[in-house]
Image: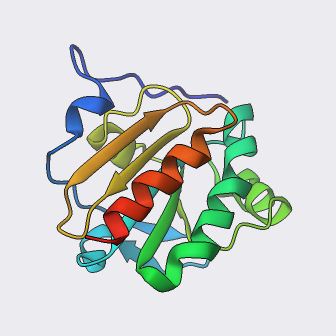
Amino acid sequence: MIVVVAPVADSSTEQMVGQPAPDFALRSLEGANLRLSEHLGEVVVINFWATWCGPCRQEMPLLDELYGKYRRAGLVLLGVNLDDTQDRAIEMARTLKVTYPVLLDTRKDVARAYQVGSMPVTILIDREGVVRHVSEGYKPGYEKRYTEQLRELLNQ
C-alpha cells in the first residue's frame, strides 16, 4: 500500500528554515534507536524517502558519497524511510549499498513533524540544531548544491 503524507494546511517544509529542528527518536534498520538531539554539535542531513519513489532511488547513492566524504568533518546523515513495513526499505538500502543509518518512520510521526508532503525531502541542520536548508524533490545536480551548503555549515 502506498501512503502519501499530506502537508499541514497552509504550511510547507521550507517554512522550517531558521527554526529548531523537531527532535525525534526512531529505530534504525540495525535495531538501535537513534535520537536527533544526540547529534547537537554536528551538521545533520535528514533525507526522507520511500521505496516507491524513483527520485529517492537516484538520490540515495549520491547522498552516500557525500556522507563518505564529509562524515569525518562532523557530518551525520540520517535516511528516514516512510514505507509501512521495513522489508522493502532493508532491501533497497542493501541494493543501493548505503552506509549511513536508515531509520524507520512507519507511523509517519516524524514526517508530519517535518511537514513532508513530497518525496524525497532533504533537510540540512546546523551544529546548533537549526534547520538551514530544505530541498523538496530531486533532480540531477542537486548534490552539487548540497555540497556547497554542507561545506558552509561544516566550516561554521
In the image, farthest residue toward the bottom: 72
Q: Is residue 82 visible?
A: no
Rendering quarter of residue 113: top left
Image quarter of the N terminus: top right
Q: Where is residue 86 shown, x and y percent of the image?
A: 65, 57
Q: Where is residue 55 shown, x and y percent of the image?
A: 69, 34
Task: Tell me what residue is drawn at x 36 percent, y 70 percent.
Answer: 154
Q: Is residue 58 above or below residue 15?
A: below
Is 16 on the left or on the right of 25, as rendered? left
Q: How is the image coloured?
A: rainbow
- From the viewer's side, name the closer residue of 50 and 72: 72
Is 85 on the left or on the right of 8, as rendered? right
Is 10 on the left or on the right of 98, as rendered? left
In the image, farthest residue toward the top: 10
Q: Where is residue 111 shown, x and y percent of the image?
A: 39, 42
Rendering quarter of residue 45: bottom left
Q: Is residue 78 visible?
A: yes
Image quarter of the C terminus: bottom left
Task: Tell me what residue is drawn at x 61 percent, y 33 percent.
Answer: 138
